[in-house]
Amino acid sequence: MKQQAERPKAAELRERGGYSVVDGSALAAMLPRWQGVTRPRPGPQAVLEAVVRLRGAALPFSALERDILSARVLEYAPEYLDRLCADGIITWQGCERIGERDGRVALYLRGDMPALGRIRVPEAGKPAAAIRDLLARQGGMLFAEITATLGGFPPDLLRALWRLVWNGEASCDTLAPLRSLRGIRGRRRAHRAGSRSRRVAAAGSDGRWSLIAGPDRGFAAPEARMAALARSLLDRYGVLTRELITAEDVPGGIGSLRPALERLVDAGELWRGEFIAGAGAEQYALPAACASLQPSQLDDDVELVVLAATDPANAYGTALRWPHTAAVLKPQRAAGARVILLGGELLAYLDRTGHSLLTFVDETDPRRGRKLARLAGVLARLARNGEALLIEQVNDTSPDTTALGGPLREAGFRASSRGLLCRPRRD
């Protein structure tokens, strides 16, 4: 390994690569481009390319298909992801439960699971242990087969199975059980041939279940895991800062990744230096990402980008701090919330209810009127192409009393008893 003195200095890298240190808005503008949000493509191949960027990221399922994959794949269809899972190309792992009907899940390429999958302490309890032992012996099984083998009360077994899921120990060959928990798909009716009786499949029981690799079932050694994690994070972000690594909840933080990152620096695959102003002295970037870190010109040609607040392509709340607001409502990376960006500028934050909006356009900005008009237009498109949008508050006050009230009305919002309302388009 090269000595520290032999590694290129940041100034030398700038001279060699022709890049300059940029402010945080350049990163916020680059990430949607880097992750394919600004140029979505159609079909299953686009889903696979999106998963390569997103693999290992713990994302709320409520936003994964509706907002995150749909932002990267034109006319996204759940069947695309299910097909890749059924073909053994992609798998998923539960990371954390969120309430009764949601949770964070991570997608992986099947071969990445030993190196990138999360390692957990086995779930306690007899029902969970019984299911774990059964799946270890039998491999993939339908839930009906699990209940027939183990006996007992099916709802209790289903709860135990989902404890294994959210603990990262069990998974399924489809994402259908996650959708049925969300109520996205109607309950499936099943019945035996020749029988008049019918059973309603319990929500969350669809598909064939199996165990994920465990500490004694094929996880890679720690050094190999850190090397794989470093590469996956670079695939996702192109540029790594201490804040981004912290937001990814990497065990040991940047210190645990440093050896793997420095090996890539020594190999000439990665640059170490200052790329984002104010993001600390220790930053790492792929050369291609440095080339993409160009500040956007905020003119009429720059497209507005709507992202789930939890989307890895949103730099705010991880690599970048949220802009200051005097409002009681504070932005956060919450499931269901959305951000609207113009270049790297955060124009607005829409909370998870869709009723409260924060705007961040400075009153002294000479382009303020144009920006607010474009913001109102994209909010109207969200409503017309999805569900009705009722904005009750803008920066903690009635929308009609703000500078955004007029643009919202011009965009198609109408007054209601609670605020300004825009309904979906009726074909």
Image: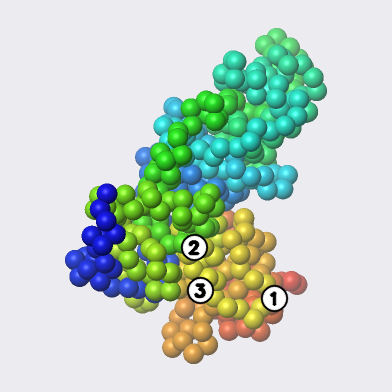
Residue 240 pos. (x, y %): 40, 59
Residues 384 and 273: in front is 273
Residue 151 got which mark? Answer: none
Q: Quadrant of residue 105?
A: top right
In front of the other: label 2 or label 1? 2
Q: Residue at x 64, y 39 (%)?
A: 166
Q: Amino acid at mark 3?
A: Leu
Closest to the observer, 255 or 220: 255
Callout 3 secondary element: strand
Residue 347: give its label: 3
- Where 62 falls versus 122 (above or below)? below
Q: Which residue is mark 2?
A: 243
Q: Is residue 102 above or below residue 124?
A: below
Residue for point 45% across, 33% down: 220
**Residue 72 image position (x, y, % from top left):** 43, 51
- State how far apart marks 2 and 1 are (Cα): 25 Å
Residue at numbered disc 1: 328
Sooner in the amino-acid sequence: mark 3 or mark 1: 1
